[in-house]
Amino acid sequence: MSLQLFDLTGKTALLTGATHGLGMAMAMGLAAAGARIVINDRDSERADAAIKEYRKAGVDAYGYVFDVTNEKAVSENLDRIEKEVAPLDILVNNAGIIKRIPMLEMEVKDFRNVIDIDLVGPFIVGKKFASQVVKRQGTGKIINICSMMSELGRNSVAAYASAKGGLKMLTRSMATEWARFNIQSNGIGPGYFATSQTEPIRAEGHPFNDFIIHRTPAGRWGEPNELQGAAIFLASAASDFVNGHVLYVDGGILATIGKPANEK
């Protein structure tokens, strides 16, 4: 198999919310494979700080400020990106939030807020991206960042799990409707990764850290750069006949029912 299958030279990728963490790690991976990187955030200071980080790493990234739930802003900014940077070939719907609130205590407005950003946002951005690809009769790759919560439930994350389960089915629907336009729509489902957000619960002896280490067959948290291979594969010609698939990068969690706490 030729490595050219994974070459993204000349391609332009938009990664929503890729100002830190897993989004930034995936963007760095796509850049290393040759892609031109565009990121967005709804906060200008956060976007500016991220662009500095990219450039420090040798990535000439472009930043745009808009809210993925605002259809008008999405349309205007993707048109701007097409004119000011290049037509988009790759979309990574990465922007998302989580609110850890038990359902009996969760207000409807909070539930709707998570659904709006994590599910409606990818629909809005994906629809605009696809319309641009179809209009120019090009090709496109959509990667929706799902989650293990697309498959599993967990206490206090009902809104997030509902959104990510919906995003899995939206991914399949995108594949069903847009494959004929030579757009491949797939998802990545990250497991538990060592990021700045998870640092407080990764301390040795922390109950959740012990739970994840024990629950994961790999026996550890993932490193953010371990998402890069999946992102490059789904963004490249190597996945031209892969459609409607969610690739779980989870150290094996979804493969097992787990094991007793005293079993090595």
Image (tube, rainbow, N blue to C red):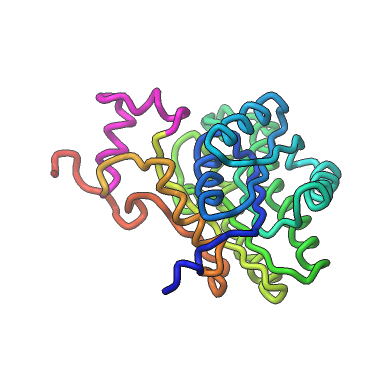
> With 188 as the anchor, is 85 left or right in this view?
right
Dividing the picture into quadrants, the one containing residue 98 is top right
User: Magenta region: which residues?
Assistant: 195-217
- Which percent across, then down, holds residue 150? 51, 52
Residue 119 visible? The answer is yes
Residue 97 visible? The answer is no
- Which percent across, then down, holds residue 22? 50, 40
Number of numbered markers: 0
> With 191 as the anchor, is 22 left or right in this view?
right
Q: Quadrant of the N terminus?
A: bottom left
Between 185 and 111, the one lying in front of the other is: 185
Residue furthest front as drawn: 58
Does residue 160 lie above or below 251 as drawn? above
- Which percent across, then down, holds residue 15? 63, 46
Between 98 and 43, the one lying in front of the other is: 43
- Which percent across, then down, holds residue 29? 50, 49
The residue positioned 45% from the left and 67% from the top of the image is 3
Dividing the picture into quadrants, the one containing residue 173 is bottom right
